[in-house]
Image: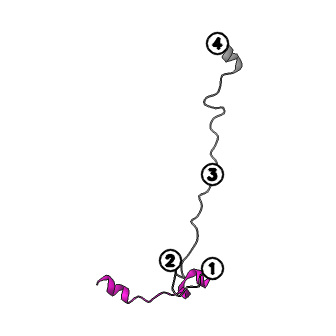
Amino acid sequence: MSRKQTGAGARKVTCDDCYFASNLLCALDLSEPCATFRPKEAELKPPQQLRFVFRQERRSRAAWAFPSAQEQAALHA
């Protein structure tokens, strides 16, 4: 079968078959379906968001810190 034969048997979609038009979400007044056409049966839900998980604090102090005033004085004395 060629592509032309496969597409010839398909029924033509209308705005009445569109998810947006059937849910009164379409603001366009066109004679044919637009580029945003989605079938009525489409489950249009956003993907589930990832959960934010706090990490356990592993260190009690920073890995690197400025030397204290006494340590700086000893270095430059």
- Mark 4 neighbour class, 10 Å CA radius: few under 14, some 14 to 19, many 20 or more: few
Which residue matches tag 3?
53
Disc 1 to disc 3, C-alpha distance: 36 Å
> Residues under labels 4 and 2: Cα distance?
72 Å
Q: Amino acid at mark 2?
A: Ala
Q: Secondary structure at mark 3?
A: loop
Q: CA distance from mark 4 to mark 3?
A: 45 Å
Tag 3 near tag 2, CB within 8 Å: no
Secondary structure type for disc 4: helix
Q: Earlier in the sequence, mark 1 or mark 3?
A: 1
In front: 49, or 33? 33
N-terminal of the pair, mark 3 or mark 2, is 2
| Dot in front, 4 or 2 | 2
Nearer to me, 57 or 12: 12
Res. 25 mark: 1
**Comes first in the chain, label 1 or label 2:** 1
Say which quarter of the image contains residue 4: bottom left
The residue sitting at 66% across, 33% down in the picture is 60
Q: Amino acid at mark 4?
A: His
How far apart, in angstroms, are the residues tagged by discs 3 and 2? 39 Å
